């Protein structure tokens, strides 16, 4: 039987620590499931985002399962999510800051209703803000190269 490498052992301890910290805030699979289900219920009825999601999500059951795995990976270090969100969002086309701002608004409103406390909500808010900014930057670079982020002409469109 071989022993885990020091790096693997460190990574396992770091993941376990992040999971324990999240669990102490009330972040767990049940919360993530409720958050994702509630959020996407609101998104589907949103006049800006709803049509985009409806055009790209044929079957909501696997999409919601993937999103739960994604948020578990982000907040609990579960490692269950496999995929490339950047490529998925670039492929949609036409997304810009207005879309991501709306996404964040709905996300934060959902958190107000389902998060067990402010500290747990902040974990999700901060992660979502980083993710939105990263995706928006990636979309802008894909459309206009590095100049698109070093000299943005218009923050409203990409």
Image (spheres, rainbow, N blue to C red):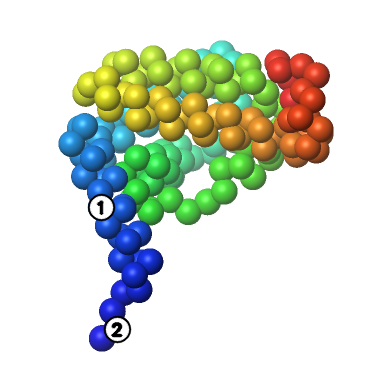
As helix, strand or loop, the secondary structure at mark 2 comes to loop
State the CA–CA distance, disc 1 to disc 2.
21 Å
The relative height of residue 82 versus residue 106 in the rendered view (above or below) is below
Which of the numbered marks, if any, corresponds to residue 16?
1
Label 1–label 2 contact, CB within 8 A? no
Residue 22: tell me if it is visible: yes
Which image quadrant for residue 6?
bottom left
Residue reaching furthest to the bottom:
1
Mark closest to the chain's N terminus, 1 or 2 = 2
User: Residue 119 at x, y = what percent?
Assistant: 27, 24
**Mark 2 crowd level (few <14, some 14–19, many ≥20, 10 Å Cα):** few
**Residue at coordinates 43% horizontally, 40% vertically from top-left?**
67
Quadrant position of the C terminus in the picture = top right
User: Residue 5 at x, y = what percent?
Assistant: 35, 73
Compare residues 154 and 83 and report the one nearer the observer.
154
**Mark 1 crowd level (few <14, some 14–19, many ≥20, 10 Å Cα):** some
**Residue at coordinates 58% horizontally, 29% vertically from top-left?**
133
As helix, strand or loop, the secondary structure at mark 1 comes to helix
Task: Please give the residue where the numbered disc 2 appears in the rendered image.
Answer: 2
User: Residue 11 at x, y = what percent?
Assistant: 35, 59
User: Residue 52 at x, y = what percent?
Assistant: 61, 26
The reply, left or right, for residue 113 in relation to residue 46 is left
Which image quadrant for residue 127?
top left
Which image quadrant for residue 57?
top right
**Residue at coordinates 57% horizontally, 48% vertically from top-left?**
84
Compare residues 83 and 136 and report the one nearer the observer.
136
The relative height of residue 22 versus residue 97 in the rendered view (above or below) is below
């Amino acid at each position: 039987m071989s022993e885990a490498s020091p790096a693997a052992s460190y990574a396992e301890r770091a993941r376990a620590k992040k999971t324990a910290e999240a669990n102490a805030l009330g972040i767990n699979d049940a919360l993530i499931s409720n958050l994702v289900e509630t959020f996407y219920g609101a998104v589907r009825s949103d006049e800006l985002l709803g049509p985009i999601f409806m055009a790209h999500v044929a079957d909501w059951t696997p999409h919601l399962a993937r999103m739960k795995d994604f948020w578990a990976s982000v907040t609990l270090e579960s490692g269950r999510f496999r995929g490339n969100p950047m490529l998925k969002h670039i492929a949609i086309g036409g997304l810009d800051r207005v879309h991501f701002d709306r996404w964040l608004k709905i996300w934060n409103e959902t958190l107000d209703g389902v998060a067990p406390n402010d500290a747990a909500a902040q974990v999700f808010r901060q992660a979502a803000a980083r993710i939105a900014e990263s995706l928006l930057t990636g979309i802008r670079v894909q459309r206009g190269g590095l100049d698109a982020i070093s000299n943005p002409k218009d923050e409203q469109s990409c």
